[in-house]
Amino acid sequence: MTAPAIELKGISKAFGPVQANKDISISVQPGTIHGIIGENGAGKSTLMSILYGFYKADKGEIFIKGDKTQIPDSQAAIAAGIGMVFQHFKLVENFTVLENIILGAEEGRLLRPSLAKARRTLSHLAEEYELNVDPDALIENLSVGHQQRVEILKALYRQADILILDEPTGVLTPAEADQLFRILDRLREEGKTIVLITHKLREIMEITDTVSVMRRGEMTATVKTSETSPEHLAELMVGRKVLLRVDKKSASPGDVVLEVEGLRVIDDKGVLRVKGIDLTVRAGEILGIAGVAGNGQSELLEVLGGFADGKGNIRINGEELDLTGKYSDGQSRRARGIAHVPEDRQREGLIMEYTAWENTIFGYHLDPTYQKGILMDNVGIQAEAQAKMERFDVRPPHPKLAAKNFSGGNQQKIVLAREIERNPDLLLIGQPTRGVDIGAIEFIHQQIISLRDQGKAILLVSVELEEILSLSDRIAVMFDGHIMGERMPDQTDEKELGLLMAGVTQEPAAADYKVVDQQFALQDQELGGA
């Protein structure tokens, strides 16, 4: 019999009081795609980081292709034919694709021969595996999907036979995810062994041959994908039956909470990103904004949340918001009853080096209830943070742990706890379940629906069409800075929304967009731009 490509025996790893991995054994056959699923904090990434040499196991053995292998660091892992694509890419943004490919793998003192060799190899790999990307493009100018291709190419350039991908579709659009699956299928056909860490059951069922389930640091099951179902896997992950659909009653919209008229947003490069859009959100309803990333949704959230300036009119509960002046920042927005869960939790929602309890009050730290004389009531804040973490099922529930030490899903819960528990009139929420496991998705969706049922207005931005259709009471689709149209969830489907997301519509207004864009450009020139 052929030896397993990977075999881990009795792997254990603890971080202080937290047992991340407990006596884990797993075998991965060569030339297969092996999925590893589990809730956030289940220990999936820790286990693979041990295999890649980022962490050293407290005990246990690693076998690669039948040979016992010591992997003290990532260089040893690379030498053993292992490559890893992390959830948050390890790329130098102001370097080119080619420079990132050879970084750490240069040959000799002169860089030019290494670059020439890498260019030839890169061309071959790109053609063989459909990983086309401009070798001279700067990383910062590439889409997230293309950055991920660079990470895969980097591993293949180092001759990896075993490829580990950690939550690879967490930051991809549906189209980019489908392209990734085609690439992985091609790699499998070429005999590569792939370990796919994900929480998305659709991906597991679509692409893997075998799936292992982890729960609270332990391996609970390994099954053939063809012999299981999403419902069974969800139950194995969470330890209970999970509702794989959003359970909600019909909305009862009240007064208009948010009014947006003629909003335009110009980015720091002078490009018009939001082009005169109008929208309203009422109390007790969820307006979902669908669209491919990069079509103005992010800028819309940034202006509403006080992260960026805009032009036009925005009213909250009938009162005008300042879009460019002294009261256009996030602090002023919160004072007006607007809470904001940003799309990028690590850059905009948290300070990663700070503790969880400190992150639970950021943006609200001037609230008198957090003060104790001239100092902050740290003891009281920590107690409140502990209670929030328990209510929102943050794991581990340790307020003094730094935000960077929580999994992505638990980081998201910290942000949600901070914003939702302020009882806002309007909740702005971007990509609420990006990188979040099935159990946490169910919980987050319940929190959003509960807030709506309390009569709050919610503006939801998501690239997940299934999420938009499940949560929204109304759906607006954005393309190239415009609202292409509104639909009711029970009167549309993913196909129609997908066409609107691509700018295809029969609505007459669409024909006038170019004229409107030209008018806006002239007005902005007269006003002096951004």
Image (tube, rainbow, N blue to C red):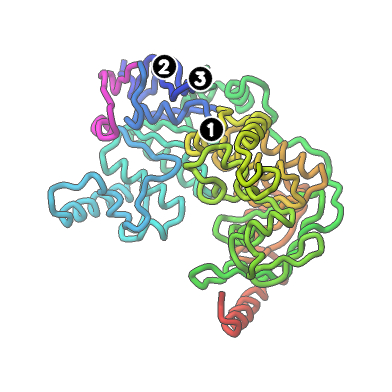
Residue at 41% in and 26% down: 47
Q: Specify whether residue 65 is painted magenta.
A: yes
Amino acid type of the residue tagged 3 in the rendering: Val
Amino acid type of the residue tagged 2 in the rendering: Ser
Residue 438 image-quadrant placement: top right
Disc 3/disc 2 C-alpha distance (Å): 14 Å
Q: Is residue 125 visible?
A: yes
Q: Is residue 470 visible?
A: no
Quadrant holding the C terminus:
bottom right
Amino acid type of the residue tagged 1 in the rendering: Lys
- 2 and 1 marks in contact (CB < 8 Å): no
**Magenta-colored span:** 60-81
Quadrant holding the N terminus:
top left
Q: Earlier in the sequence, mark 2 or mark 1?
A: 2
- The residue under label 1 is 400
Residue at 76% in and 35% down: 247
- Tag nearer the camera, 3 or 1: 1
- 3 and 1 marks in contact (CB < 8 Å): no
Question: Looking at the picture, how far across and down is residue 508, in whole percent?
Answer: 72, 71
Labelled disc at residue 223: 3
Residue at 72% in and 65% down: 321
- The residue under label 2 is 25
Q: Earlier in the sequence, mark 3 or mark 1?
A: 3
Q: Of 160 and 227, which appears nearest the observer?
A: 160
Q: Of 27 and 276, which appears nearest the observer?
A: 276
Q: How many marks?
A: 3
Question: Looking at the picture, how far across and down is residue 194, in whole percent?
Answer: 39, 32
Residue 281, placed above or below residue 162? below
For label 1, the crowd category at 10 Å Cα-Cα, with few meaning under 14, some 14 to 19 and many 20 or more, is some
* Residue 88 relative to residue 487: left or right: left
